[in-house]
Image (cartoon, grey):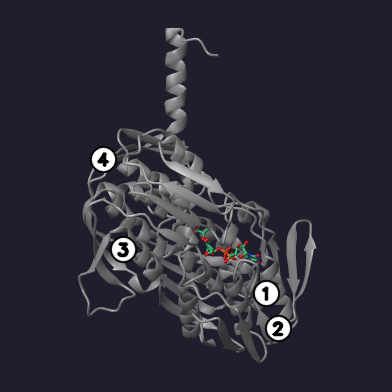
């Protein structure tokens, strides 16, 4: 198992480009299951979640060619429609094959994903949406089994207690492309990843309008074809890099920064005193070049996570780490996954003063964090610990870095190129060595 050893206190500077978006790419790979002909996806990040999805696509009978950041997927009519628990349990996002499989084969069997470290993650809205298209759904041995001789368009409401659902919208939108007649999704997720999926589906021959708004209209068609699609830049990675510059008092220029998709984050960063300067005001704001600087004399801020265009839950943990360095008290409220706070106790080990009550955390600004051994427990929480390690005095070791590798492509290489000092090491080998040396020196084990 890999870990990171971070020597803190290095100022980041230089230039970096943002990779393609994991959360856009995963449902797009699933959507390729519906195409007659090859689908070419470009600008894919190299991540363990993408590798897991490739494994699932192969199991579903898809031919996959992976070449750097390009992926070619081709499915035939005799593919499989069973996504087994063995794979689904490694990556919850596997649920996004449900709608495409149902659309292509008229049936799908997908293991019900369990909960995960960030809280309960029900899929009731996905199922309700597909039932509204005429699918018959039952649970069998822990699998969701969906069947429909012919999907039929209708009006579907996808709002839930915490807003809409991103992957649920992706599933229903995909299935509806092959339904008879018109489907209207009300209270659809407006996230940019849904807009990017609609662009891809339209280039496959679908007819979707309104993606990016709460009402999406889909006119069903009988066939979808191959396409060539460029995956949008990863807004969560972009924001994490911006915070890395800000927290190290840095001066980093970020290319392919999706400013348009990060307006709530940019607003909160500016409220704390971080400067984000567009270097190419004439380029489209979806992929611009931004210089992020900060003196790290930060002001406190309040923010609440919300569905897009609100502040993203996937940047809550990283922003909380930054606010540890503000001069005063900040308040962070999590409204999407109210238990997504596993990083709080780890930050406390580094000297942060963070107090949680339910879905709200008060962050009392401190002047310094101090390096310590900490443990990663989920993807974005791991990123927040890396940021804390960059800014802390001394050495921070982070175990279970496999969580980070799910969503950040060799983050240590990217940050080291900007001047950070991060070493990836084998935690088990190191523990074994230290146990051996304890035995040989006779250190008592209590
Ligand atoms: C997507 O997950 C992202 N994952 C998550 O990113 C992200 O945190 C989340 O959207 C919210 O933005 C991918 O895109 C692969 P939801 P998703 O369905 O679609 C409730 C990361 O770090 N809900 O939009 O699974 C749910 O419990 C990951 O990259 C229901 O009640 O999330 C939550 O409170 C983690 N019933 C809210 O809706 C349902 O059927 C939003 O969840 C579905 C969801």
The disc placed on residue 9 is 4
Tell me the CA gap for discs 4 and 1. Answer: 52 Å
**Residue carrying label 3:** 270
Q: Are marks 1 and 2 in contact (CB under 8 Å)?
A: yes
Tell me the CA gap for discs 4 and 2. Answer: 57 Å
Dot 3 alpha-carbon crowd within 10 angstroms: few under 14, some 14 to 19, many 20 or more: some
> What kind of element bears circle 3?
helix
**Residue carrying label 2:** 151
Dot 2 alpha-carbon crowd within 10 angstroms: few under 14, some 14 to 19, many 20 or more: many
> What kind of element bears circle 2?
loop
Residue drawn at the location 67% of the way across and 90% of the way down: 180
Residue drawn at the location 41% of the way across and 61% of the way down: 236
Where residue 96 appears, as percent x and y from the top left, is 59, 67
Q: Which quadrant of the view contains residue 338? A: bottom right
Left or right: 282 in relation to 169 = left
Earlier sequence position, callout 4 versus callout 2: 4
Q: Could you tell me which quadrant the C terminus lies in?
A: top right
Tell me the CA gap for discs 1 and 2. Answer: 9 Å
Can residue 410 be seen here? The reply is no
Residue drawn at the location 49% of the way across and 60% of the way down: 313
Where residue 12 appears, as percent x and y from the top left, is 23, 49
Tell me the CA gap for discs 3 and 2. Answer: 47 Å
The label nearer to you, 1 versus 3, is: 3
Earlier sequence position, callout 4 versus callout 1: 4
User: Of 50 and 434, which appears nearest the observer?
Assistant: 434
The label nearer to you, 3 versus 2, is: 3
> What kind of element bears circle 1?
helix
Earlier sequence position, callout 3 versus callout 2: 2
The label nearer to you, 4 versus 2, is: 4
**Residue carrying label 1:** 102
């Amino acid at each position: 198992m890999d870990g990171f050893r971070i020597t803190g206190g290095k100022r980041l500077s230089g230039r970096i480009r943002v990779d393609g978006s994991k959360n856009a790419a995963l449902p797009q790979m699933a959507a390729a299951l519906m195409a007659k002909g090859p689908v070419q996806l470009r600008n894919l990040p190299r991540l363990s979640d993408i590798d897991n999805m490739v494994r699932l696509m192969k199991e579903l009978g898809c031919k996959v060619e992976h070449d750097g950041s390009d992926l070619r997927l081709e499915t035939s009519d005799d593919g499989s429609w069973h996504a087994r628990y063995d794979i689904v349990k490694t990556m919850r996002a596997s649920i996004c094959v449900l709608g495409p499989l149902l659309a292509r084969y008229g049936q799908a069997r997908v293991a019900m994903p369990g909960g995960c470290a960030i809280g309960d993650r029900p899929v009731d809205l996905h199922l309700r949406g597909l039932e509204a298209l005429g699918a018959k759904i039952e649970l069998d041995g822990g699998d969701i089994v969906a069947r429909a001789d012919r999907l039929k368009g209708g009006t579907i409401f996808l709002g839930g207690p915490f807003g809409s659902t991103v992957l649920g919208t992706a599933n229903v939108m995909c299935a509806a492309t092959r339904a008879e007649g018109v489907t209207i999704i009300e209270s659809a997720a407006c996230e940019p990843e849904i807009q990017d999926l609609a662009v891809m589906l339209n280039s496959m021959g679908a007819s979707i309008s309104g993606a990016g708004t709460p009402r999406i209209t889909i006119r069903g068609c009988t066939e979808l074809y191959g396409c060539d699609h460029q995956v949008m830049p990863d807004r969560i990675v972009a924001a994490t890099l911006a915070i890395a510059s800000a927290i190290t008092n840095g001066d980093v220029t970020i290319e392919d920064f999706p400013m348009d998709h990060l307006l709530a984050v940019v607003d909160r960063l500016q409220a704390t005193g971080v400067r984000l300067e567009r270097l190419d005001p004439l380029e489209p704001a979806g992929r611009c070049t931004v210089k992020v600087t900060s003196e790290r004399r930060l002001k406190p801020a309040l923010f609440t996570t919300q569905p897009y265009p609100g502040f993203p839950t996937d940047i809550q943990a990283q922003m909380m780490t930054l606010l540890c360095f503000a001069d005063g008290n900040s308040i962070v409220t999590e409204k999407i996954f109210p238990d997504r706070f596993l990083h709080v106790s780890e930050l406390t080990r580094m000297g942060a003063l963070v107090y949680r009550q339910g879905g709200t955390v008060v962050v009392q600004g401190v002047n310094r964090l101090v390096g310590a051994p900490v443990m990663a427990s989920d993807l974005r929480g791991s990123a927040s610990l890396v940021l804390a390690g960059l800014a802390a005095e001394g050495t921070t070791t982070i175990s279970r870095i496999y969580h980070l590798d799910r969503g950040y492509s060799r983050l240590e290489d990217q940050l080291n190129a900007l001047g950070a000092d991060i070493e990836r090491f084998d935690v088990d080998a190191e523990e074994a060595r230290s146990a051996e040396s304890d035995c040989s020196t006779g250190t008592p084990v209590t």
